[in-house]
Every structure is written in structure tokens, then in C-alpha cells.
Image (tube, rainbow, N blue to C red):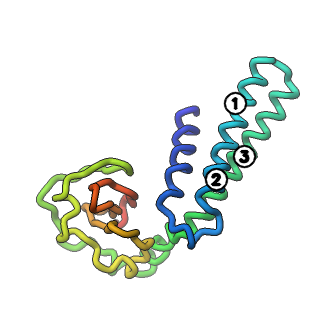
Amino acid sequence: MRKVMMTALIAAVAMPAMAPVAASAQSRGEIRRDAQDVRQQQRELRDAQRRGDPRDIRNERRDVRDARQELREDVNDRNRRWGRDDWRGNRDRNRALYARGNWRAPFRYNSFRTGVRIAPNYYGSRYWISDPWRYHLPPAGSYQRWVRHYDDVILVDTRRGVVVDVIRGFYR
């Protein structure tokens, strides 16, 4: 449970860095502060558990649960505004557009994660998605490109070779 909670918190803090600031009503700073509030509530819960007062523990658990739910809703709202889920509905309506076809790479499949540095041959110009708006992908920032990697779509910072975002199973 703790690993899942920490992973969600890390993802919630890291994800706002990818969103365009002007496009989201919930700013990066606000989501970051919400994540800090969740961590603070968790600290207070641990302190209440050490003291052993059942009323304090119950109240702190409720506060942590509420703070987590609020953070989850904020991140989901941000993703919806950013267009993160827009491509799924479009894919269901236009299956032919997302048909994989006869696409093969000269290297084997790797399951990339965000933050990993990858070799330039994985994000060369031959793998760029030249029309990401056609697939309803979120706009790429400066020095970033959407790249196809087998059935996945990867947003890569082309200056540093760092994976910014991964959408798995995009072309399935």
C-alpha cells in the first residue's frame, strides 16, 4: 500500500511539469501544494498513531483520505484539460487511423519509463509522428517530439534524449 501511495504521489508531482501552464486552470504550483498537503496529513497520521488516541487517529485518517481524493481529482482534471484522454475516444471512432500496418523497427522493443535517457536511434526523425494533432495527442513542447516505438507513443526531449511521457498501447 505504501509503495502504491508513494508512486501516486511522485507521479502527481512529476506530471504537472509536462503540462502547458496556460492550458490548465489548476496550476503546477497548486497541484504541488496539494501533494505537500497529502504528505503533511500522512505525517500527522503517523504522529497520531504513535500517541494512540483513537479519535485523533480516526480524524487524521479521514483527513489523509480527503487530501488524497482531492489530489487525485485535481490530477485527473488536469489530464482531461491537457487532452490526455482525448485520443482514446478518437481511436475508438477511427480504428483505421490507428491501424498499426507493417511497421517494424531495426531494434527490439523496450518498455520505456518517464525520466529515462534513451539513445538517439530510438527517437530519430524516421520515427517522429509528424502530425500528432491528427491522433489527438497533447501538443509537444519546444525541443520535444512524439515518437512511435512499436505500439507505444513516447514524448522525447530531443536535446537531452530524456523520455517526458509514455502512452502505452497507443496503436493497438
What separation in Å lies between label 2 and label 1 (alpha carbons)? 19 Å
Residue drawn at the location 17% of the way across and 52% of the way down: 108
Question: Residue 24, position in %: x, y?
Answer: 59, 69
Q: Nearer the viewer, residue 140 or 92?
A: 140
Q: Amino acid at mark 3?
A: Ala
Where, quadrant-wise, is the N terminus in this rendering? top right
Kindly state the secondary structure of the residue where label 1 is placed.
Answer: helix
Residue drawn at the location 27% of the way across and 60% of the way down: 159
Q: Up-down: is 5 above or below 30?
A: above
Q: Up-down: is 54 above or below 24?
A: above
Residue drawn at the location 32% of the way across and 60% of the way down: 157
Q: Nearer the viewer, residue 113 or 169?
A: 113
Please identify, in this view, whether the residue under mark 2 or under mark 1 is nearer the observer: 1
* Residue 67 disc label: 3
What separation in Å lies between label 3 and label 2 (alpha carbons)? 9 Å
* Residue 163 disc label: none
Kindly state the secondary structure of the residue where label 2 is placed.
Answer: helix
Q: Up-down: is 43 above or below 168?
A: above
Q: Residue furthest right?
A: 55
Residue drawn at the location 27% of the way across and 66% of the way down: 148
First in residue order: circle 2 vs circle 1:
1
Question: Residue 156, position in %: x, y?
Answer: 32, 61
Residue behind mark 1: 43
Question: Residue 120, position in %: x, y?
Answer: 19, 57
Residue behind mark 2: 72
Q: Amino acid at mark 1?
A: Arg
First in residue order: circle 1 vs circle 3:
1
Q: Up-down: is 27 above or below 86?
A: above
What separation in Å lies between label 1 and label 3 (alpha carbons)? 13 Å
First in residue order: circle 3 vs circle 2:
3
Where, quadrant-wise, is the C terminus in this rendering? bottom left
